[in-house]
Image (cartoon, helix red, strand yellow):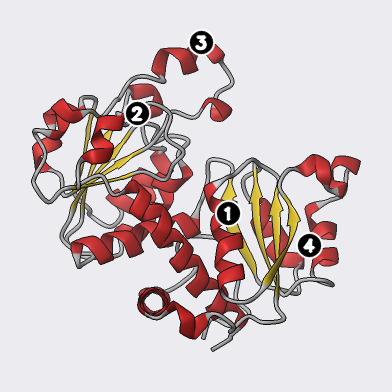
Amino acid sequence: MLKGRHLIDSMDFTKDEMKEIFDLSRDIIDKPEAFAHICDGKLLATLFYEPSTRTRFSFEAAMLRLGGQVIGFSEPNSSSASKGESVADTIRTVGCYADIAVMRHPKEGAPKVASMYSSIPVINAGDGGHQHPTQMLTDLLTIQSIKGKLTNHTIGLCGDLKFGRTVHSLIKAMSRYEGNKFVLISPKELRIPEYIKNEILVKNNIEVIEVERIEDVMETLDILYMTRVQRERFFNEEDYIRLKDSYILDGEKMKKAKKDMIVLHPLPRVNEISYEVDNDPRGCYFAQAKYGMFARMALIAKLLGVK
């Protein structure tokens, strides 16, 4: 039973609990009108201390499509955080008004702190370079819906693997399903953190290789997960400029890929996927964005315990 729970880390839910969310997501996709009023009278608070388009809109659209309403802020200067209010006090106050809250914060661990003081379910919508568990739900729902299974895939993760919280969450989640292998494609400076490699991949004897050239592994991949090099995670502008164009996926590279390989991206895209790939049926990143709304609708419904 997920009613009243928080979602802070990608490993907070069991595989069976995640299956509940995926099953409900598909029910909503198949018959959305049956779920159009299950959150009537409920309020979602969106607490976004960091800019967001897709994640915030996705949550807002999810709640509105369930019949609920939304309150909140989209940047900290429009909240009492600009006056120095703590996350703990903010969530205590928000809990007096809303039934569920979603938080994005630049500081790792801030949503976890909020959950410790909250009287309502808290959903982590991204904390620094750490976790993004609802993007993980989005990614898994997309993979399962398009590929038909979550097992026995060779998954290429390309770009910023050091600061990419979506990558960290996806590795954690897909490592729980048998037969999955990872190909980590990045410059040395943006390799996956050692704690992810050691605690998740090495510890569980999961096959993994690290390469610097996407061309060397393209034909082996079932899924290619592209990420942007994130300017906001860099302390040094020179390093960002040097690395930002390291990996650009274009039509020429796609010629080497399997016919049923799919390309995913958490978005926003800058220039790491050429626009010509948009016309390739294997480019599934906009479908992925839509699946995200359905996954969040199911998550909200489960945490609120509505039917």
- At a point 44% along the width and 77% down the height, the residue shown is 32
Question: What kind of element bears circle 2?
Answer: loop
Q: Nearer the viewer, residue 125 or 286?
A: 286
Q: Which residue position is annotated with label 2?
A: 272
- At a point 40% along the width and 18% down the height, the residue shown is 243
Question: What kind of element bears circle 3?
Answer: helix
Q: Amino acid at mark 2?
A: Glu
Q: Nearer the viewer, residue 226 or 285?
A: 285
Q: Is residue 19 above or below residue 157?
A: below
Q: Earlier in the sequence, mark 3 or mark 1?
A: 1
Q: Earlier in the sequence, mark 4 or mark 2?
A: 4
Would residue 240 appear left or right of 279 to someone viewing this image?
Answer: right
Q: Nearer the viewer, mark 4 or mark 2?
A: 2
Question: What kind of element bears circle 4?
Answer: helix
Q: Which residue position is annotated with label 1?
A: 57
> Where is residue 247 shown, x and y percent of the image?
30, 25
Q: Which residue position is annotated with label 4?
A: 91
> Decide: marks 1, 2 in contact (CB < 8 A)?
no
Q: Quadrant of the C terminus?
A: bottom right
Task: Categorize mark 1 by other alpha carbons within 10 Å: few (<14), some (14-19), many (20+).
Answer: few
- At a point 23% along the width and 40% down the height, the residue shown is 279
